Image (spheres, rainbow, N blue to C red):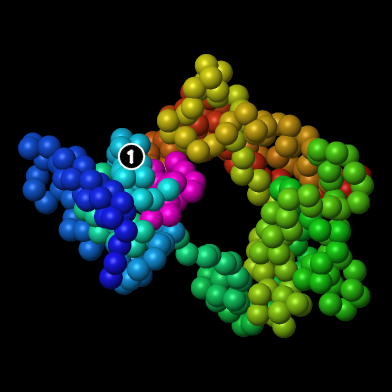
Amino acid sequence: MHFPKARFLRILAAVLVVLALGPSPSAPVDAAPASPAKLDPLLQQRSLLPGRSRVVLRAAHAGAASPALSLVPLLGGRVIRRLPIIDGVAIDLPNAALSALAGSPLVGHLSLDRLVSGAMERTGATIGAAAVRQELGLDGAGVGIAVIDSGVAPSHDDLADPASGTQRVDRFVDLTANRSAPYDDYGHGTHVAGIIAGNGFDSGGARSGIAPGAHLIVTDCDRRNVFARIGARNPLCPTIEWEKHQSPFLWSKLLGDVGFEAPRVRWAALNTLRGPGQLLLGHRLGSYMLTSAFLLRMRRSAHPA
């Protein structure tokens, strides 16, 4: 196998940097796992082949993410996209440099950046929904479920009544542009609607949805939070963009206008505290100081306006 001299020198220099950035004398000798253990099985195979690979690099810890990135160009790689939620980054790297990068104590794990596709074939069987439909005949008929998302496609075979062909979207409420006809300018709402209530028409029933629940359940987060007020990111929920959320009282008003009633708000406590968490934090003030997460439950009115 022949490598250009410049690439060989870059990889050699990077290996020296990796060795120089090794664990401190106070760290235990076995703090960093052996390099092969950090490579997923596919990358272990590709490390012996010529060419390049797209790789997801996960840092050993949050503070190691930026230093680990400095090794990538030294190894002839390039950064494709940062993945801050997992303290990682997607990179393109020569296969010959995979072992060298895995050898750094700054790197927690390397995995092949593979194409991921979603499907519903296994979901119903995995959670038992398919068995409930087949054995008990419960398929969600007569149940109204509200989807608060990006909208819904105006027409979709999987969301139609198989007998009449009419769409099973009984009501569409546009909170952004005040349009009367259904639309989905992003696609996610239609995707979620299919997971919940799709009948699998286009796949011969293989990708049918779950159709669960008899009451409307809306989970959201109130922007009225002490961290949002001072312009800081909530350390307890760092991935939530609080400014995009609304209070439960606004949701109950909007949903009340379209036929739901009896709102019940439960302020969510930290899961790790369980019962004591509900006692100390399961109210508006406690949630304001920490999370602002809430659960809003409403039922469809028997006599809608």
Of the 4 image quadrants, the one containing the C terminus is top right
Residue identifier under label 1: 70
Q: Nearer the viewer, residue 61 or 119?
A: 61
- Indicate left or right for 224 with 256 as reference: left
Q: Nearer the viewer, residue 125 or 99?
A: 99
- Indicate left or right for 106 with 182 as reference: left
What is the tally of numbered marks visible in this picture? 1
Q: Nearer the viewer, residue 119 or 255?
A: 119
Q: Where is residue 146 shown, x and y percent of the image?
A: 74, 52
Q: Nearer the viewer, residue 207 or 285?
A: 207
Three-letter residue code for mark 1: Ser
Query: Which structural element holds mark 1?
Result: loop
Q: Where is residue 50 shown, x and y percent of the image?
A: 35, 68
Residue at the front extreme? 5
Determine whether 113 is above or below 83 in the image: below
Q: Residue at x 23, y 46 (%)?
A: 13
- Indicate left or right for 86 with 16 as reference: right
Determine whether 116 is above or below 20 in the image: below
Classed neighbour count for the residue bearing mark 1: other residues with Cα under 10 Å, few (<14), some (14–19), many (≥20): few
Q: Residue at x 36, y 59 (%)?
A: 94
Residue 234 seen in the figure: yes
Q: Where is residue 2 shown, x and y percent of the image?
A: 29, 67
Determine the image quadrant of residue 168. Answer: bottom right
User: What is the chief secondary structure element of the magenta stretch?
Assistant: strand
Residue 302 seen in the figure: no
**Residue range (magenta):** 79-93
Q: Residue at x 43, y 30 (%)?
A: 235
Q: Residue at x 81, y 49 (%)?
A: 301
